[in-house]
Image: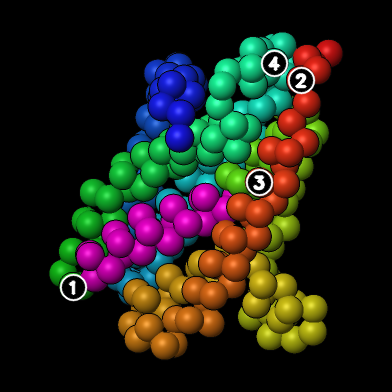
């Protein structure tokens, strides 16, 4: 692992104005949403476990969106600015460069989870589910963020254009998250049922319900955990493939 590249990514993600602005906006969104659960009549009628799950979905969704956008420009930005060649000429294997960029991007997503902890803890107060909710969001959320980051970084390498890789990554994110937006009847039959079973985002949300609302044991959760882990492994294999395609030619 190359610490200098990780530090470079952190400087670009955290210390740049856009990174700070994103985190501030996210904190504001969490504050507004938390206040709405108390003040808006329709939302205040929700069971507390439903509130936790709804907030958890928002947290994971925003963390993934930021992770995907940042990951989608990791290599394409270097190529467009003609700095990729100098980066790759350092005595560091390509996979280590990609992994260092991956870590830098993931830390931004994990920062979103860290910001969410006080809000989740407050909304979970009195349920005895604070630890479950926080651990789920941080651990499972990080695994899913890792998976989507792998895919977006690879697309950044293969497409070589920031605009193309961001658009493609977001389209992929929407397609894999589509089952969570479908009605229950559609998700239980035909193609909808197949997509529901393999969608990493759908399995993440279903696992959240199993952990927080249904309080299932580990055996009952495996049907959701296994697809999430398989997706993580396949995404990392895709990243390994992508690093072999890194070209030195500068962007247009």
The Cα atoms of the two marked residues, 1 and 2, are separated by 54 Å
Q: Is residue 128 above or below residue 245?
A: below
In magenta segment, residue 143: yes
Residue behind mark 1: 128
Q: Please identify the residue farthest to the left as the structure is shown.
A: 126
Q: Is residue 132 above or below residue 192?
A: above
Labelled pair 2, 4 in contact (Cβ < 8 Å) = yes
Label 1: how many Cα within 10 Å (few below 14, some 14–19, many 20+): few
- Mark nearer the N terminus (3 vs 2): 3
Considering the numbered disc 3 on the image, is that residue within a helix, a strand or a loop?
helix
Residue behind mark 4: 85
Q: Is residue 197 left or right of residue 208?
A: right
Magenta segment range?
129-148
Q: Nearer the viewer, residue 5 or 152?
A: 5
Labelled pair 1, 2 in contact (Cβ < 8 Å) = no
Labelled pair 3, 4 in contact (Cβ < 8 Å) = no
Q: Nearer the viewer, mark 1 or mark 2?
A: 2
The Cα atoms of the two marked residues, 3 and 2, are separated by 18 Å
Residue behind mark 2: 248
- Mark nearer the N terminus (3 vs 1): 1
Residue found 71% across the figure and 25% down from its top: 76
Considering the numbered disc 4 on the image, is that residue within a helix, a strand or a loop?
helix
- Mark nearer the N terminus (1 vs 4): 4
Residue found 48% across the figure and 81% down from its top: 222
Residue behind mark 3: 239
Residue found 59% across the figure and 72% down from its top: 227
How is the structure coloured here? Answer: rainbow
The answer to whether any part of residue 131 appears in the image is: yes
- Mark nearer the N terminus (2 vs 4): 4
The Cα atoms of the two marked residues, 3 and 1, are separated by 39 Å
């Amino acid at each position: 692992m190359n610490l200098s590249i990780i530090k470079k990514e952190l400087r670009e993600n955290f210390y740049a104005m856009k990174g700070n602005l994103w985190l501030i906006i996210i904190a504001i969104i969490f504050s507004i949403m938390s206040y709405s659960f108390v003040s808006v009549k329709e939302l205040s009628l929700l069971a507390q476990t439903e509130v936790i799950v709804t907030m958890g979905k928002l947290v994971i969704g925003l963390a993934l969106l930021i992770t995907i956008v940042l990951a989608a420009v990791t290599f394409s930005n270097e190529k467009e600015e003609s700095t990729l060649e100098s980066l790759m000429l350092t005595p560091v294997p390509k996979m280590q460069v990609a992994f260092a960029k991956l870590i830098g991007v993931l830390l931004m997503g994990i920062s979103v989870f860290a910001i969410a902890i006080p809000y989740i803890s407050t909304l979970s107060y009195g349920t005895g589910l604070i630890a479950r909710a926080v651990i789920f969001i941080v651990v499972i959320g990080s695994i899913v963020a890792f998976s989507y980051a792998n895919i977006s970084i690879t697309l950044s390498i293969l497409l070589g254009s920031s605009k193309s890789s961001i658009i493609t990554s977001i389209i992929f994110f929407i397609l894999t998250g589509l089952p969570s937006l479908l009605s229950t009847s559609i998700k239980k039959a035909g193609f909808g049922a197949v997509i529901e079973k393999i969608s990493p985002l759908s399995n993440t949300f279903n696992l959240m319900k199993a952990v927080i609302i249904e309080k299932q044991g580990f055996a009952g959760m495996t049907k959701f955990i296994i697809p999430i882990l398989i997706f993580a492994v396949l995404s990392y294999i895709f990243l390994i493939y992508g690093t072999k395609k890194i070209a030195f030619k500068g962007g247009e």
